[in-house]
Image (cartoon, coloured by chain):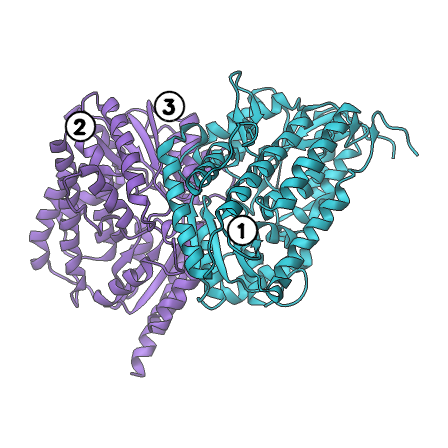
Amino acid sequence: MTETKYETKRLDCWGKAKELRTKYYKDYVECRERGGLRWEGGAWSFDALPEALEGEIRPLTEEPYGATCGAVPAIQRKYQEAAEGKWGCAKDLCAYMRSYWGSIILDEFAFGGKWPESDFIFQNHICCSHAKWLQVAGEIEGGNIPYFCFDVGAGPFYKIGERQIDYVTEQLYDGIEFLEKTTGRKIDDEKLARKVENTYRSACYWSKACELNQAIPAPLDEKSMYSLYVFGVLEKSNDDYADFYEKELYPEVKDRVANKIAAVGDETCRILGDSQPPWGFLRVLRYMEKYGVVSIGSLYTFSLVGWWRIDEEGNLKPYKTLEEQGITIKNREQALRLLSEGELKGKLMWAPFYGARIKNDLVKKIAKQWKCDAAMVHLNRGCEGTAQHQMELKLALGNMGFPVMTYEGNMADDREFDEARTMRLIDLFVTETMGLKRLKE
Amino acid sequence: MEPSEPLEKFKEVWEKRHDYARDWKKRTGGEVVAYFCTYVPEEILYAANILPVRILGSHEPPGLATPHMFDMWCPFSRDCLSQGLAGKYDDYLDGVMIAQSCLHPRHAFGAWELHVPTPWKYFLVMPNAVRSPRAKKFLAGELLEFKKAVEELGVKPISDADLDRGIEIMNENRRLMKQVYEFRKQDNPPITGAEAMTMVWASQLMDKREHNELVKQLLQELPKRKVDRETGVRLMIVGSENDDRPFMEMVESIGGTFVIEDHCTGARYFWDEVIPGEDRIQAIANRYCDRVPCPSKDWGPTGLDHKRFPHVLKLAKEFGAEGVILTQQKFCDPHELDIPSLRRYFESNDIPCYFLEFEVTVPVGQFRIRVEAFLEQIRAKELFV
């Protein structure tokens, strides 16, 4: 065995994470046999609400499904070509969305079997595609699926006050009315309180785990983080997922930091990413490790799920859990307001929707706090939401004297990704710009 | 067509928009604010005697925008940014703003904020869920904040009387342009689609009080305007931002006439008025939530329906459109999302459609052949009736 600069080992909770994820899709398919209901919605939907209905309810979130398809280019291509050819959509639309539509058109579920239609749609909207994604999906599925969609575009995190929280909370009440009317089931307020607490636990403990990645050596590499954040976009209010973040992942990462257990044994260079990676080509991230490069995360990886705040010194800090804030939820109004408040104030991934300046400020903080040496920005043609202001980011980091490499691709459409070219770009960037040498195999 | 002074003036303003704005500023001493999206409530700017001007395309390759927006962003937005970066607005603009729109102009606005020296910048949080019962109250709150910001820019408070004036300037402009559009319903319309839309583009670029006078003059002329062209196939054009006059003129030179459209640079911009109310701000908010929506805001919150579809079908029928050209700026997600459904919707109502993807510059030669084929297809149908 080759000796490395730092001790490294696989995460102990990795197996548990795989088990939980497999169960998620299995439960979605099988829950009807147990009298359960199925709903489809966005990764950012307020899942605490349907999950607070009486009985078993299982979600299918659209973006992680699209990413799963993207990880297998042959499947992704088949689905996207169906969406483009049979439905007639443009091929530059969101890559996840095209896979999702194609899956419905071909009546195929990427995990096997026929497309498992849902009982209702419970969506959120901030990017142009969100609401329309399931509006079209519902149309493809025959136009009979009950649909509800929230608007969370209430302003940037630092401008959130009572009026903005009112706007979203009032929609949550409308959402409850929709759910009860559509399903014939009632919201259980005790369950709702627990689901909101879980949402806080998932969002805050993911952030705490990400914060630990400021350590040298980094305990987590971004490729692994993609597999770990996923629970926060599958069903953040789920009891098991919140427990996983709080009781398994966070303590383990803390332990790795204390014992200097590295994600990349020969960590010599820390880079910052941006946007989703090309899912079918994650080996690109492993390839960089041959130079001792570890990708420590990104605004995307940290805050797609995680909630953050800016402290008095202007630093990014994990948002506080309800327990840390000393709050016990007493009634529905409080639960719904807390849910709106956490998402609107804490989810910094929504900040770029309000301008390049805001994104630049946040990413510059990450670059400094996480002690990054350079950035590799995936100019993601597959997602306009996360690709916002990427070129501005390049300029802003460059002005800090920060080396930045950009490579164009698509998170989930292999027809727009040139793997060999990207590898060559990485070779040139890390050797010529960063002055690194390839480590011994 | 017989020359028309107001129509010539509209064309001149559209072509020399910066000269017009500079001259307006010199004449009035007022402020000029450029905006990116038609969800900007111009009523409040007019209430403060500020001239709102929409940033429209230059139809030149947007090379200057490339370091700020890579090419998956819509060419129109890159074109708008490029003009700002080229300094075309530098010597007269007092402010720039956007209302929460689709992501493409927002992206351009984000870069503009950082790189184009404009003293005042404003991002209005226009709700996305305009059809939600919660949106109007929220927007009214946003508009109150916006009013305060405009008061600071104009250095004076905006009274209810000012708001009434702003609302009436906008409403009168909407009413007058709608009267002009009535003429497009005629068997031989005395105004072409290119001319009608140029009138709308000019209204987005010039002082609406001056525009109103010209539209009134046009309304006097149109009943007696000599029509020396064949109407040919009556067409509707629907889609993303469109101020491509050469394309419109080309189609109208080969046997078609655009009798109506649904663009934010056309009917969709002015179709709905503010219904005055005691609470002026709420009345304005109601208008912007109730107006014919941009596809980016045409959803739910409950139900899969589109509010825009029955509206455009009604227009097509009222104006006697025999076919629809569906256009979309390349990469324009909101329209890309609607077009497959909208095409099916029109076709299920026996209105044939033809799709064209627009760029900043369009290949007029290729498009001519394609549109000719579409016109022939429609005419051929008539042979078998």
Residue at numbered disc 2: B158
Q: Eyeballing the image, is B26 above or below A336?
A: above
Identified by mark 2, the residue type is: Ile
Helix, strand or loop at mark 3: loop
Which label belongs to residue B312?
none
How packed is label 1: few (under 14 Cα within 10 Å), some, or many (20 or more)?
many
Image location (x, y in percent) of residue A256: 77, 29
Position of residue B279 in the picture relative to residue A79 (left or right): left
Identified by mark 3, the residue type is: Pro
Chain-order first, disc 3 or disc 2 = 3
Which residue is more in the foreground, B52 or B311? B311
Residue at numbered disc 3: B117
Question: Do the residues at discs 3 and 2 belong to one chain?
Answer: yes
* Outermost residue, top side: A313
Image location (x, y in percent) of residue A148: 43, 54
Which label belongs to residue A51?
1
Which residue is more in the foreground, A349 or B15? A349
